[in-house]
Each structure stands twice: as structure tokens, then as C-alpha cells.
Amino acid sequence: MATRSRGFLAGFGWLKRGIGVGIRHPKPALGGAALLMLAVLGSTLITLPMQFYELHSGTPPSMAAFGGIMLVSVLIGLLVLPLYAGYLQMIAAAETGLSARAGDIIKPYREGKVLRLIGYGIVMLLVYVALFAAVIALTGGGIAHWYMQVLTAQLNHQLPPTTLPDGFGITMLLIFVFGIFMMGFYSIGLGQVTLHDRGVFGAVGDGVIGALKNLLPLLMLAVCLVLTWIAASICIGIVALVIVMVGKLISQWLVLALITPLYIAVLLVVFAAMFGVMYHLWRDVCGDDIAMSGAEAIAA
């Protein structure tokens, strides 16, 4: 499967078109984002009682309990992954002028693609672990030792270490570089599995090659994301501040009544924009007439 390289400014185009998905197709994009957000929050609530019990059991949480909670979280995350693919399918259908509805995010379950998507999720999890291990190996064991101290302090309700370990700066830089790579890797791979019906390892290979070919536009995308988030945070902060000031004059309940919809609206826009960027990144790097035919089949 051929992958293409794009120019440096392509990253800005991916972000611009990704944000525009929610504007061009508000009903399916925001409705699907709402369903996806409910699924993500619902899966979080499953492990919340376990965490609450460990925190209030009166004894320091054991590593076995912590590992069990992490395992349950991973398993739930793998079950939610097909909904991500379904949402990406829905965006592809909407962006190619086909019928798209919010409920289409469950299509991978109906179409029998769940096992392949879960397999892709497992491979990606192993890749994340391998990359993290590579970062630790490149920067020495100081970060790992410091992290274990922080984790032990949290488990025993103690204060964490107050000093950063040696190599902290270079570790953050490497994580940033790997994060840029993984942003493209994951988007391309998920697009290939979902929209091109590629096998797990074929999609992973396409993701690696496509991301390596497009490191510069991915860097541009990362910079644009940071700048956009800063600008959006300032605007949202100003709106929230006005709501709080008005609420102090009228009622504290009014603050809650206005802040909650604002928070939900921001989450929906972020979900829609994030997957819109993923779709347009994939389409520029791997999309072609075959992919559009696949999108038509998805929407049928």
C-alpha cells in the first residue's frame, strides 16, 4: 500500500479541515461525538468504584490492586476502540457527501470488524510500551526510578519527591518527538484498518512509513495544535470568568447551569476536531479512489 509525503504546511491544512468537520456536518459530527463521549465516560465509571474503594479502604493500595485496575482499564479501552473506528467511518462518509448519522459509530460492531480493531489496539499498546522502554533506555534508569518513587508515594499517601531526576529535560524532548510520530502513526494506521480494510500488521506498517515520510508536516500540526489550544483556552477562560462573575451577582446555581453546557460543548468540539484531523491526515497520506469506494460501502 503506497503512502505519500506531504509538504510542511500540510499540517496546518489537516488542522483547519479537521476543525471544519464540526462546522460542515454539525449534526452527525457533534451527535456522534456525544455518543462517543458517553461511552468513554461510562467506561471510566466502571473502574471508578474500584479506585474509590482502594483510596478509602484504610490500608495502602497494593501493587496487585493497582495492576488489576490498570488491566481492567486497558480491556475496557480495547472494547471502546471500535467506536473510535465507527466515528472515523462516519466522518469519512460525511466528508465524501454520503449519508452519515450519529448512530453509525456502532457500525464496526455490526460489520464484524471488532476483533481486527481490538488486534490493532493491542499491537498499538505494545508499540507504546516499546517506545516508552526505548526512551527510558536512552536516558538511563533515573526517570524510571523517580517514577516508581512517585507511584509508591501516591499508593502510601505520602508526599512525592520534590526534585526532578537527571535527564528529565531530554526525556521530555524525546517523548515530544515520539508523540509527534505516534500522532501520525496512529491516525494512518487506524484509517487503514477502518477505511481501507487493511490487516493489522499491514496497517501498522503503513502507519510507520507514512509517519516517517511526513514528520515535518506532523511537526507543523503539533505546533498549530499547541497555538490553537492556547488561543482557545484564553477564549474559554474569558467566557467562564464572565459566567462566574454573573453567577456571583445572581446565583451560584446559575454558574453551574452555564458552566456545565460550556464544558460539554468544548469536549464535543474537541472530539469532532480530533477525529476530523485524523481523517484528513489519513486521506492526504493514504486515501485514494479505492478508499472513497470503501467509504461508500461503509455508508451503504
Image (spheres, rainbow, N blue to C red):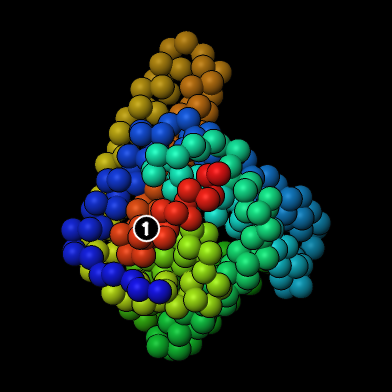
Determine the residue positioned at 55% across, 54% down: 85
The amino acid type found where label 1 is placed reads Asp
Front residue of 258/244: it is 258
Front residue of 198/122: it is 198
**Dot 1: few (<14), some (14–19), or many (≥20) neighbours within 10 Å?**
few
Circle 1 residue:
289
- As drawn, 261 above or below 65: above
Determine the residue positioned at 30% across, 45% down: 17
Q: Is residue 81 at least partly visible in the picture?
A: yes
| Image quarter of the N terminus | bottom left
> Quadrant of the rendered structure where residue 5 is?
bottom left
| Image quarter of the C terminus | top right
Determine the residue positioned at 45% across, 40% down: 98
Q: Is residue 36 at least partly visible in the picture?
A: no
- As drawn, 282 above or below 263: below
Q: Is residue 9 left or right of residue 53?
A: left
Residue 164 position in % (x across, y down): 41, 73
Q: Is residue 210 left or right of residue 58?
A: left
Residue 284 position in % (x across, y down): 31, 59
Residue 292 position in % (x across, y down): 41, 53
Front residue of 36/150: it is 36
Determine the residue positioned at 44% across, 48% down: 92
Q: Is residue 52 left or right of residue 24?
A: right
- As drawn, 81 above or below 260: below
- As drawn, 263 above or below 80: above
Residue 256 position in % (x across, y down): 53, 24
Front residue of 271/201: it is 201
- Disc 1 is placed on an element classified as helix
